[in-house]
Image (cartoon, coloured by chain):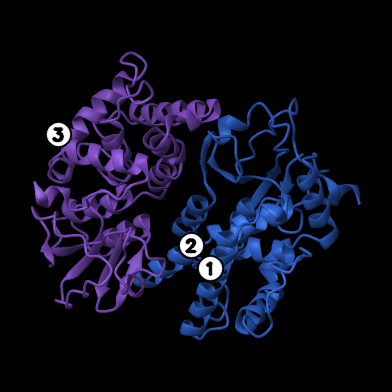
Chain colours: A purple, B blue
Amino acid sequence: MVGTNKGNFNTPHLKTGDPLPPYTGKLRLYNMRYCPFAQRTVLALNAKNIDYEIVNIDLMDKPEWLTTKSAFGKVPALEIAENVSIYESLVTVEYLDDVYPQRPLLPKDPVKKAKDKILVEALSPIHTVYFKLVRGPDTITEDNIAAYHKNLTFIQQELQNRGTKFLDGDQPGYADYMIWPWFERLHVIKHDLARLDKQKYKLLLEYIDNMFQDPVVAEYKLPREALEHFQNQYKLGLKPVYDFLIQK
Amino acid sequence: MVGTNKGNFNTPHLKTGDPLPPYTGKLRLYNMRYCPFAQRTVLALNAKNIDYEIVNIDLMDKPEWLTTKSAFGKVPALEIAENVSIYESLVTVEYLDDVYPQRPLLPKDPVKKAKDKILVEALSPIHTVYFKLVRGPDTITEDNIAAYHKNLTFIQQELQNRGTKFLDGDQPGYADYMIWPWFERLHVIKHDLARLDKQKYKLLLEYIDNMFQDPVVAEYKLPREALEHFQNQYKLGLKPVYDFLIQK
């Protein structure tokens, strides 16, 4: 039932009626394979090469015990000791960065750290447009579009100002990995808003290419067909085949 | 134009056409006297007894220079060196806690810190109900109400589990001050949802009383008539008299 970490992310999504896998003593992530928020925690765990196990959750037919691991019944939740869990994606990542010093993700300098967090806090326009693109592009307003471009421009401007390959330097860090799940998902959407203008967003597009080549990103990247399946079901209000990647 | 910190929060709210006050070398907070988000930064600054100045902003007729201090034109923004600003309320508070070690607000222990941040991240149902109470109680849904009570119960349960006067111990800390602005505002609302049940929320109500008596909270507390003026104008979609507290 319980997958191990590296290389086996596609464990069955446990659902109502399924028993809680026995505690193994290992750090455990309650995850959903398509969830962009949980992906943040996965990227942090994998970047730091932490030994952990994944328990995937069917979020449309949740196991009864989920709220004992995550008070709001959401993923990601990180069980750091038996029956001690923390949740909210950014909280779990910061916890990991505090406790596992290898490959620090957040800058140590308070101003740089603040600037990374501002980039991540500012992300809601991209998030909004992505979900509306999936759910129904007709609901996207002019204000949504303006905020979306402002947000993309803000990220590109930071890349320019920093002058580094990634936002956090030679390799991706906190800002890069916390923003990434939405760029990965926008990439497969067939809509003008998701196809970024090659001139206007030249630097940002190079950056996105570089991120796709990062080994931590590549290892957890969803195959296009899986992501499209999930987006299509979501659009129709239907339950996705959570275990799509296992059934293949 | 520029107020100093302690005891003089009610400086004029600068508006379109008003010049940027010359840089004084002092840490500067761009603020709006009624803003619950900016209040978080004020409470952190005051709790730490940091020397700073306030520049209040008319958010409905913003000064042209505001976006040079806060990229999204919002408050709070903290100018930490000339033309170097950080913003987003929680980012500013964490920055202050990193740089000014006196009276630490965030717990040092990574798990306790995570738990404090979860409490603050979980706050959106209270925020939603508060804004709908002000703007139009008719728009509050059953789901809003359920989430609101779940959120209040979650905070009360944490108080119970921690067994301390405040969430962060004998005196308020990060979780207390970051949550506080909404409790202060709910307190003046005349609606059943804002009047918490004395039995069900006994511990939470005691806590709210204790918070009102905290000197840092008391010093910045909005007089009831000012808050009611702001809420009434907001409900009607009218511009509040930002300088209400100066005109008195």
Q: Secondary structure at mark 2?
A: loop
How dense is the environment of label 1, judged by Cα within 10 Å: few (below 14), some, or many (20 and up)?
some
In the rendered image, residues at marks 3 and 2 fall on the same chain: no
**In the rendered structure, are the residues bearing label 2 and label 1 in contact, judged by CB atoms less than 8 Å apart?**
yes
In percent of width and height, residue A64 lies at: 32, 73
| Amino acid type for the residue under numbered disc 3 | Gln
Q: Is residue A181 left or right of residue B2?
A: left
Query: How far separated are the C-alphas under marks 3 and 2?
Result: 35 Å
| Amino acid type for the residue under numbered disc 2 | Ala
Q: Nearer the viewer, residue B179 or B84?
A: B179
Query: How far separated are the C-alphas under marks 2 and 1?
Result: 7 Å
The residue identified by callout 3 is A213
Which residue of the protein is positioned furthest toward the right in this rendering? Answer: B248
Q: Secondary structure at mark 1?
A: helix
Please give the name of the residue rendered at 22% of the width and 75% of the height, measured from the top-left corner: A20
Report the disc number at residue B151.
Answer: 1
Q: Where does the N terminus of chain A fall, quadrant-wise? A: bottom left
Please give the name of the residue rendered at 61% of the width and 57% of the height, measured from the top-left corner: B141
Q: Nearer the viewer, mark 1 or mark 3?
A: 1
Report the disc number at residue B122.
Answer: 2
| Amino acid type for the residue under numbered disc 1 | Asn
Report if residue A180 is visible in the image.
no
In percent of width and height, residue A38 lies at: 29, 54
